[in-house]
Image: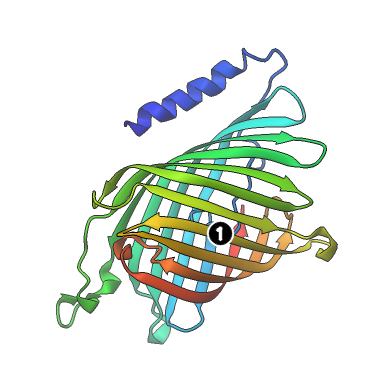
Amino acid sequence: MDMRKITLFLFVLAINLQFVYAQTSIKLFPEKLNIQPFTAHLLEPKLGCQFDVNSNELRLNIGNSLDLVSFSNSPSNNFSIGADFFTFTLLRSQNDFHFPVDAVDYLFGVNAGYKQLTESGEYGIRVRLSHISAHLVDGHYDKINQVWKNGQTPRVYSREFFEFLPFYSFDNLRVYGGLTYIYHIDPADLGKTIYQAGFDYFPAAASIGNFHPFVGYDLKLTDISKYRANNSIMAGIKFGYAKGRGISLYYNYYNGNNFHGEYFDKPSEYSAFGFNLDL
């Protein structure tokens, strides 16, 4: 399936839908995302670092999601189309403030979101079409002995997928559940369906001014040689807007398959503290 054709289709759809509703309001490059990132979901736009508690590993995440166009035919609903570009980088800390890069994963794609406000809350869905590729970098290479560290040599890992995440929000609690369908993956013998569920919560009663505590949990069932649970728990405090821009300081616990594609068949468990600039 050609991603360029799908991207073109989404833009044509956005333009044509304005003629379906006579009172459609269209915005190019709206100020904030229609669908805010899911807090504990690892494949979300991040701009910051996190530092493992029990190892010398750290993660540098650079990425953003941008809504390119949004439109609605009433104040209670909104449809958007946007783009995603992320890098997720694994580094190792060494003496003299050196941080060699071990592995990096690249994600890019397009997304579409729909949100409907009701008297009791809001519901909607976000759909993403994305590509991920993974690479080992020179920080994983032992230059003195001229070998790849831990016997782990570079290998091809990439996937193209659709992600479907319906959600429902009420009283600052958002719950979601959906699936990812991988229509192409290399190595080809890996599973092609990921099941996912989770929540995030920004308790209004605990907020003080622009400081907003939050907690989130994300569960994925991924099929490597068999289905395995991948758990991500995140808790912290955000300075800024609970549903918008700000700076988040957080704790993250993860247990499951390794997040980085070059280590897809390796188990991973870590506790980390980090910060993120929520754009």
Determine the secondary structure under disc 1: strand
- The residue under the point 56% across, 59% down is 218
| 94 to 273, vertically: above or below | below
Quadrant in the picture for residue 228: bottom left
Q: Residue at x 72, y 53 (%)?
A: 173
Q: Nearer the viewer, residue 243 or 32?
A: 243
User: Split into 4 quadrants, where in the image is the N terminus?
Assistant: top left
Residue at x 23%, y 55% (from the top left corner): 156
Q: Give the image location of residue 155, x and y in percent.
A: 21, 60
Q: Would residue 106 appear left or right of 51 to someone viewing this image?
A: left
Colouring convention used in this rendered image of the protein:
rainbow
The residue indicated by pointer 1 is: 218
In the displayed structure image, the side of residue 103 where residue 141 appears, left or right: left
What x and y, as percent, mark residue 101? 35, 70
Q: Residue furthest left?
A: 146
Label 1 environment density (alpha carbons within 10 Å; few <14, some 14–19, many ≥20): many
Rendered location of residue 19, percent (x, y): 62, 12
Determine whether 257 is above or below 123 in the image: below
> From this viewpoint, is residue 232 visible?
yes
Q: Does residue 249 appear in the picture of this structure?
A: no
Say what amino acid the circle numbered 1 marks.
Asp
- Provide residue 57's location: percent of width, then percent of height: 42, 77
